[in-house]
Image: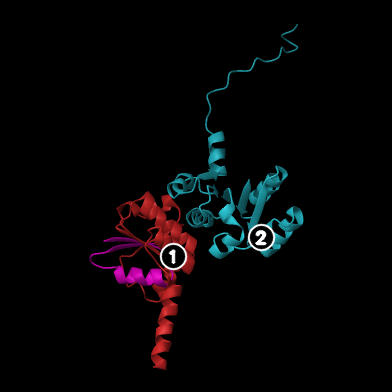
Chain colours: A cyan, B red
Amino acid sequence: MYAIVIGGGRVGYYLSRDLLERGDEVTLVEKDSARAEWLESQLGSIVMRGDGDEMAFLSETGVERADAVVAATGDDEDNLVALQLAKQRFNVPLTIARVNNPANVEIFKKLGVDMAISATEILLNALEPQEPAPVAESPPTAKASQ
Amino acid sequence: MRVLIVGCGRVGSRLASELDGVSNEVTIVDREPSSFNKFAERGLFGENSGVRFVVGDGTDAELLRRAGIEEADCLIAVTEGDNRNIMAAQIAKHVFGVKRVVARIYDPIREETYREMGLDSFCPTIEGANLVRQMISEDSR
């Protein structure tokens, strides 16, 4: 699989690293040159310096043959636009967004992004009050065994 | 007409003061609390100004709801960021069904793409370049 990851923050870095380890082809896009340099020292030549929402740049990444584009920057609006362009202009089959505002999960889907993932939403769900867990049988105490 | 303007810069504040009046109810949103006062101090919003100011992120659906987007007839997205304008305009159009939506997009290529996608937008870069070209060509005649 060929995946383009936009945004080389922590999320984009670990995602690219693990995709590479899995044997996938990856291009990681980062606009900050200092950060891009560091990413390159870790991951090699898969890193490209540029703006994921600039069309001319996006076409340099080979986006038209990408199986998936993941937008993982910290700004929801940048992620949305990068993925809409990938979809609209380059017919990328799978577009996935990291979203910060959980409300944007539904909004992004409405606006044509295939999948939107919010860490906040996942955490919220994990913290949802659960059915009270069955009381674990306590191991016999010293007192009880007497 | 109820008008919601996202971005209280030069264009946003000017539009707000021009539209403010008998038949218009204008709300302007900006994430920077001081932006409204900046233009008020320059006398843009008069003493009897009815322009309402809401502080917050215009790409946040919940904030837009609080700013009255559900009753708005029109949303104009004129923040400094193309992507923020694109996102605010699309939320207005596709999530809240606002009838008239206008977005400013500085990047000509991006503007063309979104216009093709059905978003009403304008590109100051193209407009500005055209205007200057016209002025120069008039000189050379």
Is residue A72 left or right of A35 when viewed as pictured?
left
Residue A54 visible, this angle = no
Q: Callout 1, which amino acid? A: Glu
Q: Camera-side residue: B117 or A31?
A: B117
Q: Are marks 1 and 2 in contact (CB under 8 Å)?
A: no
Residue at 57% across / 43% down in the picture?
A119
Reading the image, the residue beneath label 1 is: B112
Q: Residues within 10 Å of mark 2 (few under 14, many from 20)?
A: many
Q: Camera-side residue: A68 or A118?
A: A68
Disc 1: host chain: B
Residue A133 shown in magenta = no
Query: Which of the 4 image quadrants contains residue A52?
Result: bottom right
- At mark 2, the secondary structure is strand
Q: Callout 2, which amino acid? A: Met
Reading the image, the residue beneath label 2 is: A48
> What range of the chain is rendered magenta?
B1-30
User: Which quadrant is the C terminus of chain B positioned in?
Assistant: bottom left
Is residue B27 left or right of B128 when viewed as pictured?
left
Residue B94 visible, this angle = yes
> Above or below — where is B3 with respect to A10?
below
Position in image of residue B72 (x %, y %): 31, 56
- At mark 1, the secondary structure is helix
> Above or below — where is A131 with respect to A89?
above
Residue B22 shown in magenta = yes
Whole-angstrom CA distance, mark 1 to mark 2, is: 25 Å
